[in-house]
């Protein structure tokens, strides 16, 4: 049985349904990331898990116990908030040890656990400071420390890194991931940053308007997106979508013919209309190769590779090519396409074919 | 820039002197005039020419039992009523903040006492606590307590004064504390809830310390205002029975407008000012100590 189970969980604020029925099982020790565009209900879901928001219907259970109507404190979750939510008048030491002290832990044990957490998070030199005298990254670590020492059943993180600068974010990302590995605590982590989601998660749940679009490990999400939304959301730069027609084992797009991988050709048959998806980074030499010609309007050299931005027919297309690839703005060029990495979606339902 | 607008510029006097003169005439002159008068013996009725008497007025005040009596009465009324105002006001603010049932009704009405003139409040209270006509005594006799001389027994009269002060000024405390509560960040309390901190510990360890600076300010305002109480006392008991409920301001009023002993009254005002300054300073120093523990 899963450690955390959400079943048919819904949430409505007044007449507005934010979360339509949602089912999700989280395994013990799993690092689960909820990702999705702003306003898709990630925070709401997390807060329902924490008990800070009451579910409109459905049930939540943690470790086999129904906690749907349990007070937040009795769910044995620890939460890290986006804006840290530290106790401003307490020192770092007191912030971290406060919950233990209230619950009557022995002073020696508090001291030991706080020391250990501080050591782990590199906070030892700051133990006697007030949060206002700390940098954003340090505050974030205090908030994590406060969650750590409680040794809870479940960690809940709500965009804990979004207030940090890019460099610190990358560092903290690794630290949190390592920490979770070491502790083996079930973790639900909310972010709207897909890179964060992909790098940290055992399993990523892509949400959209309160619905789960796909829940899978990062590689599956990237290689076999369940629908057009996931395909578009995961990956940067985003996947190209071209309206196409399949005929005689080839994709016809904007008057060009790209021969299909034989397996795909057999599976798909002939279709008058599909959405043909290809990631910019898959416009490269490969065995099942096809070629796509277009006129780049903008050429963006990024160092490691170069982006070519142009149009095929009416539709925008981005290709990621080798820096030495011969291309100039306004001059037609032909890029190779790795057809083993082609994705096809139903143009009506957006579901993967 | 800085150099050119420097010393020799005559225009600065045009801007500076009017303000300086206004301050001088409006605030400093009356104060200084009163200070001078406080060292004189002046009587209007019967008129006597001003005569410099040095600190005699002050010496008289300090050796007068009536002064120390009014001092004691004022202190009891102020400290007890401010303490009650703060505790009740804070409790109400918490109830309103947490939307206790019935909060909405109270939210509309709770400010009313504050808008009433103290004289009206005192008149109403005088009716309510009237020995024969008041509803309180009706109820008391109904319960078999007999008639209670609320306004004519010294201790009871002080208690009634405290009650009226609390009734009138608790809303002020509630209003400010409610504003303070609403300005506190929600997440901090949510974090505490998730960490299973019981409600009263959340109050003691988080709400209270975070509102401490505001509390200090609110109590300070009420203390200073409380020391000036006169209208309520004047209407309710007139300082009686005897001088048992006479406050400092009422004492000064009686000296000034019943005996027209202006020198003495001025000296009394200054003594009063000094007392308020001492109490205020001592209070702030103590509050600083407590705050340093948290800040
Ligand atoms: N208290 C509330 N009352 C009404 N609507 C709310 C409330 N809280 C959230 N919502 C709505 O619920 C939806 C989901 O909000 P939520 O905060 O869960 O989004 P999110 O996925 O966390 O977004 P973000 O990435 O911007 O944090 C939003 O459309 C929001 O407007
Ligand atoms: Mg959010």
Image: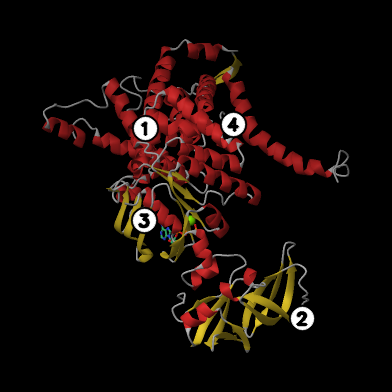
Q: Position of residue B255 (x, y in %)?
A: 45, 22
Q: Which residue is mark 2?
A: A330
Q: CA–CA distance between discs 3 and 4?
A: 39 Å
Q: Is residue B254 visible?
A: no
**What number is the disc on residue A126?**
4
Q: Position of residue A201 (x, y in %)?
A: 50, 53
Dots 2, 3 in contact, CB < 8 A = no
Residue A281, compared with residue B3, is above or below; it is below
- Residue displayed at 47% across by 10% down: B63
Q: CA–CA distance between discs 1 and 2?
A: 77 Å
Judge by depth and name the residue closer to the eye, A129 or A29. A29
Mark toward the start of the polypeptide (3 vs 4): 3
Q: Quadrant of residue A249?
A: bottom right
Q: CA–CA distance between discs 2 and 4?
A: 57 Å
Judge by depth and name the residue closer to the eye, A310 or B125. A310
- Residue displayed at 45% across by 35% down: A149
Judge by depth and name the residue closer to the eye, B39 or A7. A7
């Amino acid at each position: 049985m899963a450690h955390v189970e959400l079943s048919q969980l819904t949430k409505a604020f007044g007449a507005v349904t934010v979360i339509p029925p949602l089912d999700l099982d989280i395994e013990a020790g799993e690092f689960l990331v909820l990702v999705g565009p702003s306003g898709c209900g990630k925070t709401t879901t997390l807060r329902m898990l924490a008990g800070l928001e009451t579910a409109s219907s459905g049930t939540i259970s943690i470790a086999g116990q129904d906690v749907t109507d349990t007070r937040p404190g009795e769910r044995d979750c620890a939460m890290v908030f986006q804006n840290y939510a530290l106790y401003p008048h307490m020192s770092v030491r007191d912030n971290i040890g406060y919950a233990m002290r209230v619950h009557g832990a022995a002073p020696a044990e508090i001291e030991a656990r706080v020391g250990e957490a501080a050591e782990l998070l590199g906070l030892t030199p700051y133990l006697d400071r007030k949060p206002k005298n700390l940098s954003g990254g340090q505050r974030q670590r205090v908030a994590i420390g406060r969650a750590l020492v409680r040794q809870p059943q479940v960690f809940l993180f709500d965009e804990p890194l979004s207030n940090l600068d890019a460099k610190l974010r990358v560092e903290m990302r690794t630290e949190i991931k390592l920490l979770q590995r070491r502790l083996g605590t079930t973790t639900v982590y909310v972010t709207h940053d897909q890179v964060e989601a992909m790098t940290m998660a055992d399993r990523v749940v892509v949400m959209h308007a309160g619905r789960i679009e796909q829940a899978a490990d990062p590689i599956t999400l990237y290689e076999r997106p369940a629908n057009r939304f996931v395909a578009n959301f995961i990956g940067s730069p985003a996947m190209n979508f071209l309206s196409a027609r399949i005929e005689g084992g080839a994709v016809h797009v904007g008057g060009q013919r790209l021969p299909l991988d034989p397996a795909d050709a057999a599976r798909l048959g002939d279709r008058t209309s599909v959405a043909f998806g290809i990631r910019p980074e898959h416009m490269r030499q490969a065995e099942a190769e096809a070629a796509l010609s277009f006129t780049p309007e903008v050429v963006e050299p990024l160092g490691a590779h170069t982006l070519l931005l142009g149009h095929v027919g009416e539709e925008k297309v981005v290709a990621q090519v080798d820096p030495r690839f011969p291309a100039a703005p306004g001059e037609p060029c032909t890029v190779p396409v790795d057809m083993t990495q082609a994705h096809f979606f139903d143009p009506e339902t957006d579901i993967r074919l | 820039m800085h150099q050119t607008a420097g010393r020799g510029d005559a225009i600065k006097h045009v801007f500076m002197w009017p303000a300086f003169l206004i301050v001088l005439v409006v605030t400093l002159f009356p104060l200084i005039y009163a200070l001078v008068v406080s060292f004189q013996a002046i009587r209007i009725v019967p008129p006597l020419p001003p005569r410099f008497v040095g600190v005699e007025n002050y010496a008289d005040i300090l050796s007068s039992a009536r002064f120390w009596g009014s001092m004691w009465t004022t202190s009891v009324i102020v400290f007890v009523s401010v303490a009650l105002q703060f505790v009740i006001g804070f409790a109400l603010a918490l109830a309103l903040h947490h939307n206790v049932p019935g909060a909405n009704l109270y939210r509309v009405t709770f400010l009313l006492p504050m808008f009433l003139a103290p004289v009206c409040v005192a008149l109403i209270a005088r009716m309510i606590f009237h020995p024969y006509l008041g509803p309180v005594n009706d109820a008391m006799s109904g319960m078999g307590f007999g008639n209670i001389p609320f306004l004519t027994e010294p201790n009871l009269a002080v208690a009634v004064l405290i009650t009226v002060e609390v009734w009138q000024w608790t809303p002020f405390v509630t209003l400010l504390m409610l504003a303070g509560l609403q300005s506190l960040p929600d997440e901090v309390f949510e974090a505490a809830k998730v960490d299973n901190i019981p409600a009263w510990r959340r109050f003691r360890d988080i709400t209270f310390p975070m509102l401490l600076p505001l509390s200090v300010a609110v109590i300070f305002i009420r203390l200073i205002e409380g020391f000036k109480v006169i209208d309520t006392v004047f209407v309710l008991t007139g300082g009686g029975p005897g001088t048992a409920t006479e406050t400092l301001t009422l004492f000064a009023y009686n000296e000034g407008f019943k005996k027209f002993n202006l020198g003495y009254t001025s000296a009394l005002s200054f003594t009063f000012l000094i007392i308020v300054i001492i109490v205020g300073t001592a209070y702030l120093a103590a509050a600083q100590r407590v705050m340093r523990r948290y800040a």
